[in-house]
């Protein structure tokens, strides 16, 4: 089968041809796990990170179950004899040093904070794996999910703030912020700019977003980190109808996680736009 000229040029520009595409790929990073599972041939995958099958942080756990998982030591990666290791730019520097010292080829997977960067990352990783056409297909799936979200009915809310344990909030330059913006939800005026920042409970109440967004709903104040999220003042101002749950697995990575995240938000907004008597839990 002959590749279209545009795809062939992309492969060549990344220094990979179909003949020398990696045959044993190891992922040492959660986001790389999901990209490899979506874009590589099954026989190319030699091992995945310890988090690959953790449903709290990954949307690809069913596929991940078929492959070996690493320990956090570089030795477990070396033992698999990879010709390509995908590793995060914030993963352990010592591990990266050891792997490079062994002559292994590394490709860094950067953290994603916006959809444009996510699309570029998909294109790049697909080309490195020798399957640029799969990258284009995944990008098309992301765009289709975006279109579904944009077409969804919108509830009568305009501002939202994602509040994590301990009072840390996600800003507009975070992936969570980008996803909420796609859903038509912006931080309230006065919220921490950029990647976000710490917000005391009193300030959160004064910012008064239409809804607060949580990665999960803490049942009680089991520790200091969850105290603010279970405070009576916050519970009074933000009952369940004014809270959105956006699980962590949707806010960590690009690639296939974006499709799942955008479709999750589509279902969420559709439900919130319904009259209260029609909503289901």
Image (tube, rainbow, N blue to C red):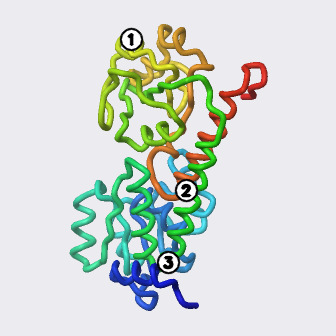
Label 2 environment density (alpha carbons within 10 Å; few <14, some 14–19, many ≥20) = many
Position of residue 56 measured from the top left corner of the image (x, y, whole percent) = 54, 45
Task: Tell me which numbered mark, 3 or 1, is placed earlier along the sequence.
Answer: 3
Rendered image: mark on residue 131: 3
Query: Is residue 35 among the parts visible in the rendering?
Result: yes
Measure the C-alpha gap from mark 2 to mark 1: 36 Å
Using the rendered view, name the quadrant where residue 171 is placed.
Answer: top left
Label 3 environment density (alpha carbons within 10 Å; few <14, some 14–19, many ≥20) = many
Using the rendered view, name the quadrant where residue 117 is placed.
Answer: bottom left
Quadrant location of the N terminus in the rendered image? bottom right
Position of residue 150 measured from the top left corner of the image (x, y, whole percent) = 59, 43
Report the number of discs: 3
For the point 56% across and 49% down, the residue is 146
Rendered image: mark on residue 206: 1
When the figure is inspected, residue 240 is found, relative to residue 187, above or below; the finding is: above
Assign a secondary structure to mark 2. helix
Residue labelled with disc 2: 142
Measure the C-alpha gap from mark 3 to mark 1: 50 Å
Q: Nearer the viewer, mark 2 or mark 3?
A: 2
When the figure is inspected, residue 124 is found, relative to residue 167, above or below; the finding is: below
Measure the C-alpha gap from mark 2 to mark 3: 17 Å
Label 1 environment density (alpha carbons within 10 Å; few <14, some 14–19, many ≥20) = few
When the figure is inspected, residue 58 is found, relative to residue 153, above or below; the finding is: below
Task: Tell me which numbered mark, 2 or 3, is placed earlier along the sequence.
Answer: 3
For the point 38% across and 29% down, the residue is 169
């Amino acid at each position: 089968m002959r590749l279209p000229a545009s795809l062939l040029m992309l492969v060549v520009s990344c220094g990979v041809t179909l003949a020398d595409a990696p045959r044993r790929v190891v992922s040492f990073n959660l986001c790389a796990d999901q990209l490899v599972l979506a874009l590589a041939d099954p026989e190319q995958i030699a091992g995945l990170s310890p988090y690959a099958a953790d449903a709290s942080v990954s949307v690809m756990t069913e596929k991940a179950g078929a492959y070996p998982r690493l320990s956090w030591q570089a030795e477990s990666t070396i033992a698999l004899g990879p010709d390509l290791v995908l590793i995060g730019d914030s993963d352990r520097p010592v591990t990266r040093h050891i792997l490079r010292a062994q002559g292994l080829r590394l490709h860094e997977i950067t953290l994603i904070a916006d959809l444009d960067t996510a699309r570029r990352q998909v294109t790049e990783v697909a080309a490195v794996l020798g399957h640029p056409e799969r990258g284009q297909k995944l990008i098309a799936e992301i765009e289709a999910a975006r279109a579904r979200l944009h077409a969804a009915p919108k509830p009568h809310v305009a501002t939202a703030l994602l509040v994590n344990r301990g009072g840390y909030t996600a800003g507009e330059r975070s992936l969570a912020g980008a996803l909420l913006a796609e859903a038509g939800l912006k931080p309230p005026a006065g919220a921490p700019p950029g990647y976000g920042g710490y917000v005391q409970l009193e300030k959160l109440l004064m910012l008064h977003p239409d809804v607060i967004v949580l990665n999960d709903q803490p049942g009680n104040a089991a520790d200091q980190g969850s105290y603010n999220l279970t405070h009576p003042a916050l519970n009074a101002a933000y009952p369940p109808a004014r809270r959105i749950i956006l699980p962590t697995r949707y806010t960590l990575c690009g690639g296939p996680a974006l499709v799942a995240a955008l479709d999750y938000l589509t279902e969420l907004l559709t439900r919130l736009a319904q009259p209260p008597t029609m909503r289901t839990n």
